[in-house]
Amino acid sequence: MIKSHLLFITCLLLLAQCTPKKVQQAENKNNRSDSLQTWSVPSYQGQDYTALVNPFVGTGGHGHTYPGATAPFGLVQLSPDTRLTGWDGCSGYHYSDSLVYGFSHTHLSGTGVSDYGDVLLMPITGDVMYNNGADGKKGYRSRFSHHKEKAQAGYYETYLNDYDIKVALTATPRVGLHAYSFPKGKPAQVILDLVHRDQVLDASVEVVNNREVQGHRRSKAWATNQHVYFVIQFSKPFNQHELWVDNQANANKKAQSKSIKASFSFDGNVAKEPLLVKVGISAVSIEGARKNLETETPDWNFDGVRKKVQTAWNHELARIAVKGRTLKEQTVFYTAMYHSFIAPNVFNDVDGQYRGRDAQVHQASHPYFTVFSLWDTYRAAHPLYTLVQQKRTNDFIKTFLLQYQQGNTLPVWELAGNETQCMIGYHAVPVIVDAYLKGIKDYDATLALQAMQTSANQDKFGIGAYRKYGYIPASEEPESVSKTLEYAYDDWCIAMLAKQLKQPKVHKKFIRRAQAYKNIFDKNTGFMRAKRQNRWFSPFRPEEVNFNYTEANAWQYSLYVPQDISGLAQMLGGKPQLEKWLDNLFTASTETSGRHQADITGLIGQYAHGNEPSHHMAYLYNYVGKPWKTQQRVAQILSTLYHNHPHGLSGNEDCGQMSAWYVLSAMGFYPVTPGSNDYVIGSPVFPEATLQLENGQRFTIRAEQVSANNIYIQSAQLNGKAYTKNYIKHKDIMIGGELVLVMGNRPNKAWGSQPTAAPVSAITAHLIVPVPYFEGDLTFERADHQIKIAHHNPATKLFYAVAPNKNAAVTSLRFVPYHAPVTIQTSATVWAFAQNTQGQTSDTIHTRFSKIPAGRTISLANQYANQYAAGGNKALIDFVSGGKDFRTGMWQGYQKVNIEAIIDLGKEEHVKTMAIRCLQDQNSWIFMPTRVAFFTSPDGKKFTKAGVVENNVSPKSEGAIVKTFEVKFGEATRYVKVVAYNQGIVPAWHLGAGGGAWLFADEIMVEGN
């Protein structure tokens, strides 16, 4: 997910709402501080599945995983830090690195933005150093090599070459446990670095005694207000300590500052046996960290903790037992399960206290969680949890509702008590609805529906425009196509819950909103396209990556209608056309154009498995009666895009989503539409896969004769009876039983191909009529300007009205049938709506068409970037100005080159002023021009300088800034030349140093008297 040109949106901490009685009682239950959530792990006698886990998978390439020790869904992720910056350093570790800076206690698994890396410890020998060495100067970092490195579920080991120290790590849910084996005869030290990685807002440290240190760190990164409290205990006393505060030695036992490091020195006896270090952490308090430490690691038994955490992992991994095929495939499978069960992370202390979305401390009687990468995980990870993590699913949803109470909305991408607002949609909704419809209901469903509606009725992130227009215009919000599509699916989920709770008005409202996709479907191209002023965004290239889509292009988003696949097929022209569309997707060229988007990886044609929007697409063949094509493509993805090595993932792991896709697909099915209770059957990997369900039942999928070549289903039986459907219901799995699939090396095109064999994905009630659209330039110079009105359905009748007054009320207009292009002579607003054959009407659209001075033309010396065309060559003189967000498509962008434009006014005019509006957003590599020069000419050949305006906006200024560069003139001229000078290269201080700087403009204004 996320990532180039990511615009960080600061989380707003809102006042908590009044807590409904039912949830307040649940939160106050067991409110005593001595009610501890002990870490109890039953004994385990089964197969050692941890031997089939390779935590190094995904640590190379763009997987962004880490190899360190963590418990299932644990707060602590104790892992080596080898990379401090950069996109491929998001987890703190990259397999290509050879230097390690230390071992910190929090890490993110597979995200596209960096954070965490809290409370770093580094054992060293020799002289104490506080510089980490990242600046190339001498520092405490060390070389390491992979041949002395080991990673298992719950355990990590490496060797520090520069210090001759073996490091072993293990963890409980809330405690990290280190074991350092120092060499004999060398001074032994442990460095504590509280400055590591994030911007520190405040920190403290206190040496309690010669075995214990405590403190806290509050930091700002992706999570803008993260609290970490810690207690560190050593198995042996240190004989000396030093605090390093604000880069100066401090002999005190306490310190508070934004810059704190410390060292702890041990005598020669420390080499006789490993030095153990326990670190308990908490988001609440030092007392909470100490309780966590004392409860979960009451003694100094490193091997006992390692065995216990690996037993905990075996219990989790044993929830699905696969047999057969190769060791490689089993390792890929169980590593995928392991990655699926790392996050979300428990966030409350053993006494139930946690820090909420309002930054205040609260109490919960159930496990409370953090790290919800919901744009990713609602698709497969959370549906997987509804099968094998039902109790935790209830706790996830209870967490959502508490966060709603404390933060006024359901979580979007919550991290350490902070709502980052990263990515799009309100995807806590499908997680709740999918669980509820599957019978997972241990929470207040009425409150959940209230929370869903609150999140869906905001006025930010384009939701206000979405509600107003029935889709999001590109001029109103970036990523308008993706947001429209994902909001529509979320709204369908809300409608499904409203139906269950017998709320017909809510159901009708949201089932109509769920059809918003119909308003952005272009029948002529067969793609979902952006609209500006009710006109199709152009020029259009389906392979182009631009800001109309989220980390994707039109190929990768146009089939995102999981709630109404039948309706989508109908709009395309029928099931054969949807099948052809899918064929073209998988066989298209892998080349993309436009923005560089690092997430678009794992390409098969334009199918991009390395990012989430494509994840359901291979299964859509089942809906058109061609399940054998699903089987072929799914088998291809399983075998070519997942591997047992560091580069084994085709994209970001994304907190379990990439791996959950594999787990489900390798078993033989996938949830195309969470909330439907359907799992679409694909092509299983293993001869046998058994789900150990929490209700005590077992469900087994047997794939007889399956192999690398035998990927096609020949026949099927469910519980001994012939089964011809190409999907299976959740309830069929939960009651236990057996699905037998007979596999072969050739497609059986008859199995699962009948219309009744496919899952139903159709909206049939409260159907909307899609809005029409306009064709024609927004601005025109001469009379008799023609405007076409069109609709994707030729049987639909169109009606229109013309109003010269831009503020005319729709109720005052007289609409007439549309038969031919509308001709206007002067500026006017054109209104239109569609009516179907049953007499139902669409929403009414309107667009202002403006007459501008005649004869003006523009010639450009340098070409703008196509993804920032802003409508084409005349965008800079179209009398339509962009807002502050360059992603809305209203700004014309140039990279590394100047804007050099000559405007022909058509005739000699008296010009009073000349100006150009420019935009800066340095977080997106967009900078003001260094200066703008203006020239005039009577003949377009010989130009005279009219003035120069120097830039006075600092390139370091944060946020979006619009500046008008203007000169006064006061003479007659015909030609105006404007040169805005691009600074060329991104400056050295910037994250994108050395890259090509962008220059954005809209509009060039030449004003007369």
Image (tube, rainbow, N blue to C red):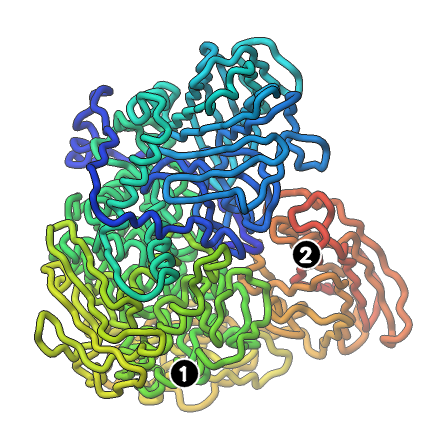
Residue 11 position, x and y percent, is: 45, 41
At a point 82% along the width and 61% down the height, the residue shown is 934
- The label on residue 400 is none
Q: Is residue 336 rendered to the left or right of residue 214?
A: left
Give the amino acid type for the residue marked by disc 1 in the picture: Asp
In the figure, 103 relative to 338: above or below?
A: above
Question: Which quarter of the rendering shows the C terminus?
Answer: bottom right
Residue 70 in sight here: yes
Q: Residues within 10 Å of mark 2 (few under 14, many from 20)?
A: many
Between residue 61 and residue 614, name the one nearer to us: 61
- The label on residue 918 is 2
At a point 41% along the width and 41% down the height, the residue shown is 415
At a point 53% along the width and 75% down the height, the residue shown is 590
Q: Is residue 407 rendered to the left or right of residue 321?
A: right
Residue 443 position, x and y percent, is: 17, 43
- The label on residue 583 is 1
